[in-house]
Every structure is written in structure tokens, then in C-alpha cells.
Image (cartoon, helix red, strand yellow):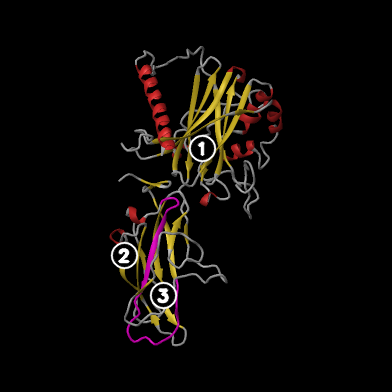
């Protein structure tokens, strides 16, 4: 007991010593205080001259780096974005002829207006496999010796709402900023005479309609010749597009900064295509599992239901779930063929189903009776549409549960019955911004 008492006294002594020290410090004048700091960079001269800018997507994500072309048999010439029928348009008016953004030589140096629409069309990779889609930005700037930095800022579409301060009043949300890497004279030299070579950067930009051949190849004013001479800089950098980001028009702002701090910005727009893809986790993987919807042992006159869930576990899950692996909203349609007896050929033609992205039965969309059109076999399948209410629309990467049921009529003989259920996903525009639903 005495030892314990001595330890207690020692501990109290230490506490008292700290308390005294704290009391002394509290009477001093030293204290922490935040003070504002500021500075200003005064620009000198004009900003750099940006001649042209263009974008190119990776056309083969299975190969490392940027592949500028992809040839799909029976075609013999590659494509360079995901919708070659759409061309860049300087005034967004498709009725007045094709507008070439970067043009000029031989009479003037290459130039392009700001605000060009539809530069390229790109779709994200489903499930971001084998990787997120790569997009490469390019820009040509005069007098690179006077340029201190080149960077791009990408903005994605969004829904303005007081609860999302990152979305501005005009419907743009900042996505990412990347800084340019300048080509060396040797790299510019390697691009000479490639404007007709399928798979090259220059041919891809020309074939896309983003740059004219003369803008690259003119011996006096062309970008490649002047890049070799060091009087023009070609800069590039890439960024990643995920299927979890929204589809629609993206704004691409390119800014060049002079050594004196002056800036010049050129803006254009690219199209991120809206995609959707339906996947199911009960499709099966023979011989590992047969998959499908198994109603089990059913009784004539009684309903049998297979309950779904929100756990996506392909390919052998017995609780039906569906998933959208695209970047836009997806709705669902469903039809059943009759269940037909293997021995006697009798038909079961009435079914039902509930569907939604919540287990709350009040928010599921249910069809209590899906009857194929005729009571006499063969019965054409009746298709139902679960609709476009938010609880029935799957945004990117969302899972929905499906609860199918069968209503066997009285008087059916014992037999093994089989049929088919068909699920169809379809695009629901306006509900989703990538993996987020629009604000209510």
C-alpha cells in the first residue's frame, strides 16, 4: 500500500508541475494569429498566339498508349473517333456546309475560331475495361520561346443546384486540368510526310476534319515545318474518360501563358456519347451453372415468385439483379414466352414482375399480371416497360432488383415446363449525369 501511495504522490506532483507551467504561459503576450497574404503578377505584353487545337481519342484501349486509328473489317481505312458522320462545325450550323476548324495555308498561317462544336465524338469503355478511355489534347502555339506554360481545363455538363457548388450557373463542372508537353524538333521531324499514313496523329486529325492537310504540310506556313525550325510549338497531353462521368457536350479550354504572365485561351467542344449496357447476374455459365429464372416446384392455381436483390454476383446468382455499365440512364423492358410442358405440351401464359433500385416495395414498379396475348397456344409474348421514374432508371454502375413470378392456371398436369424471359435495356436521357441522378 505504501508503494502505491508513493506512486500516487509522484503522479500528482507531475500534474501540478505542468499546471504551473501552463499558468505561466497563459500570462505571456505570445499567441498564434492568422493574417492574410496576397500578391499580384503584372502581365507584360500580349498573350501567346494560339493557332489551332484538336483532340484525338485512343481507338484501341487494349494496346498501351494512344492508338490514333482502328480498322474494323471489312473496312480498310481506320476510324479516328466514335461517330465519323459528325464533323467539326465552327458555328454549330450543320446546314451551311462543313466548317473546318484549323485551316489557312498557303495564303495565311493555320488558324481556327473559338467555340468550335463537335470536334470529336467519344464513348467511354463499358465498365472502364480494359482501362478508362484516353483522350489526347493537341495545340499549336507561336514563338514557343516566349511561352512558359500550356494547359487544358476540361469541363463536364452538370445540373445547377444549390446543393452542388461545383456546378456553375451555366451548367458546367470542372473535371480536370492537364499541362502540355512540347514536341522536340526531332519529334516534329518524325511527323513529316505522315499526313496520308493511316494510324498517324496527323492523318487522324485530318481525316476527322479537325485540321487541313496544308495546315500540317505547307512548307512555308505549315505547323510541322515551323515546329522543326523552333518558331512554332506543338504541345500535347492526355486525360482519362470514365464511364462514371456524364455524357453530353464537354468544354475544352486551352490556355497558353507567356513568360511575362499574359494568357491566351481558346475554347472548343467535344461530344461524349451517351451509352448504356444491360448486364444480368443470373444468365448462367454452363456447365458451371445453368442460370436463368428457376421457379422451382409450382402448384396449379398458386403464384410462385423468385425474389431478386441488389447484390450483383454474376453469372450464377439465383436472386435476379441487373446492372447498367454505361454512362447514361437505362430503363428496362421485360417479356416472357410461355412455359411449355416437355411431355404434354401444355402452356403457362401468365406472369408478373416487380423491378427497381430499392428493396422498398412502395418504390418498385410492379405488373401484377402479364398475360401473353391469346389463351390458346402459341401465345405471342407481351412486353412490359417499367418506365422512366427515377427509382426504375439505372445510372452508371447502378444495380436494380427484379422479382419475377409465374401464375400457373388450374388443371395443368405434372410436367417439366420451360420458357424464356427477355430483358431489354434502353436509353433514358436526362435522368443521369454519369453515376449520379439529376437533382429532384
Residue 112 part of the magenta-drawn span = no
Dot 3, how many residues are within 10 Å of its Cα: few (below 14), some (14-19), or many (20+)? some
Q: Relative to residue 369, is residue 429 depicted above or below?
A: above
Q: Which residues are magenta?
A: 395-420
Question: Which residue position holds label 3?
Answer: 295
Label for residue 366?
Answer: 2
Q: Relative to residue 118, is residue 422 depicted above or below?
A: below
Question: Which residue position holds label 1?
Answer: 119
50 or 296, nearer to the observer: 296
Residue 111 shows in this picture = no
In three-dimensional space, the C-alpha distance between marks 2 and 1, rounded to whole angstroms, equals 44 Å
Dot 1, how many residues are within 10 Å of its Cα: few (below 14), some (14-19), or many (20+)? many
Q: Residue placed at 66% from the left, 36% from the top?
A: 195
Q: Residue placed at 49% from the left, 25% from the top?
A: 265
Reading the chain from its start, which is encountered first: label 2 or label 1? 1
Q: Quadrant of residue 81?
A: top right
Q: Secondary structure at mark 3?
A: loop
Reading the chain from its start, which is encountered first: label 2 or label 3? 3
Dot in front, 1 or 3 = 3
Amino acid at each position: 500500500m505504501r508503494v502505491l501511495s508513493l506512486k500516487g504522490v509522484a503522479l500528482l506532483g507531475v500534474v501540478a508541475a505542468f499546471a504551473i507551467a501552463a499558468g505561466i504561459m497563459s500570462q505571456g503576450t505570445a499567441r498564434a494569429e492568422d493574417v492574410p497574404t496576397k500578391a499580384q503578377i503584372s502581365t507584360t505584353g500580349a498573350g501567346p498566339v494560339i493557332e489551332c487545337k484538336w483532340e484525338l481519342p485512343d481507338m484501341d484501349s487494349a494496346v498501351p498508349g494512344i492508338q490514333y486509328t482502328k480498322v474494323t473489317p471489312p473496312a480498310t481505312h481506320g476510324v479516328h473517333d466514335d461517330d465519323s458522320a459528325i464533323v467539326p462545325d465552327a458555328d454549330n450550323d450543320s446546314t451551311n456546309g462543313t466548317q473546318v476548324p484549323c485551316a489557312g495555308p498557303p495564303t495565311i498561317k493555320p488558324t481556327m475560331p473559338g467555340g468550335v462544336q463537335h470536334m470529336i465524338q467519344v464513348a467511354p469503355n463499358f465498365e472502364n475495361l480494359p482501362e478508362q478511355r484516353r483522350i489526347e489534347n493537341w495545340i499549336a502555339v507561336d514563338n514557343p520561346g516566349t511561352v512558359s506554360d500550356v494547359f487544358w481545363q476540361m469541363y463536364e455538363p452538370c445540373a445547377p443546384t444549390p446543393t452542388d457548388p461545383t456546378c456553375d450557373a451555366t451548367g458546367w463542372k470542372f473535371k480536370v486540368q492537364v499541362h502540355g508537353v512540347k514536341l522536340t524538333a526531332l519529334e516534329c521531324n518524325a511527323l513529316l510526310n505522315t499526313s496520308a499514313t493511316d494510324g498517324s496523329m496527323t492523318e487522324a486529325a485530318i481525316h476527322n476534319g479537325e485540321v487541313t492537310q496544308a495546315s500540317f504540310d505547307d512548307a512555308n506556313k505549315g505547323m510541322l515545318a515551323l515546329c522543326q525550325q523552333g518558331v512554332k510549338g506543338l504541345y500535347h497531353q492526355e486525360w482519362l474518360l470514365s464511364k462514371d462521368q456524364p455524357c453530353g457536350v464537354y468544354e475544352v479550354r486551352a490556355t497558353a501563358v507567356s513568360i511575362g504572365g499574359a494568357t491566351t485561351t481558346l475554347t472548343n467542344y467535344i461530344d461524349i456519347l451517351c451509352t448504356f449496357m444491360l448486364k444480368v447476374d443470373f444468365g448462367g455459365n454452363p456447365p458451371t451453372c445453368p442460370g436463368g429464372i428457376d421457379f422451382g416446384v409450382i402448384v396449379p392455381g398458386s403464384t410462385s415468385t423468385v425474389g431478386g436483390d441488389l447484390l450483383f454476383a454474376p453469372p450464377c446468382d439465383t436472386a435476379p439483379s441487373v446492372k447498367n455499365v454505361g454512362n447514361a440512364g437505362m430503363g428496362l423492358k421485360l417479356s416472357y414466352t410461355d412455359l411449355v410442358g416437355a411431355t404434354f405440351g401444355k402452356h403457362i401464359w401468365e406472369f408478373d414482375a416487380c423491378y427497381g433500385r430499392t428493396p422498398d416495395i412502395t418504390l418498385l414498379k410492379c405488373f401484377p399480371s402479364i398475360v401473353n396475348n391469346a389463351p390458346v397456344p402459341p401465345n405471342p409474348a407481351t412486353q412490359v416497360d417499367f418506365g422512366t421514374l427515377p427509382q426504375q432508371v439505372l445510372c452508371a454502375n447502378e444495380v436494380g432488383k427484379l422479382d419475377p413470378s409465374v401464375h400457373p392456371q388450374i388443371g395443368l398436369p405434372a410436367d417439366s415446363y420451360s420458357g424464356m424471359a427477355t430483358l431489354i435495356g434502353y436509353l433514358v436521357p436526362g435522368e443521369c449525369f454519369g453515376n449520379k441522378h439529376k437533382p429532384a
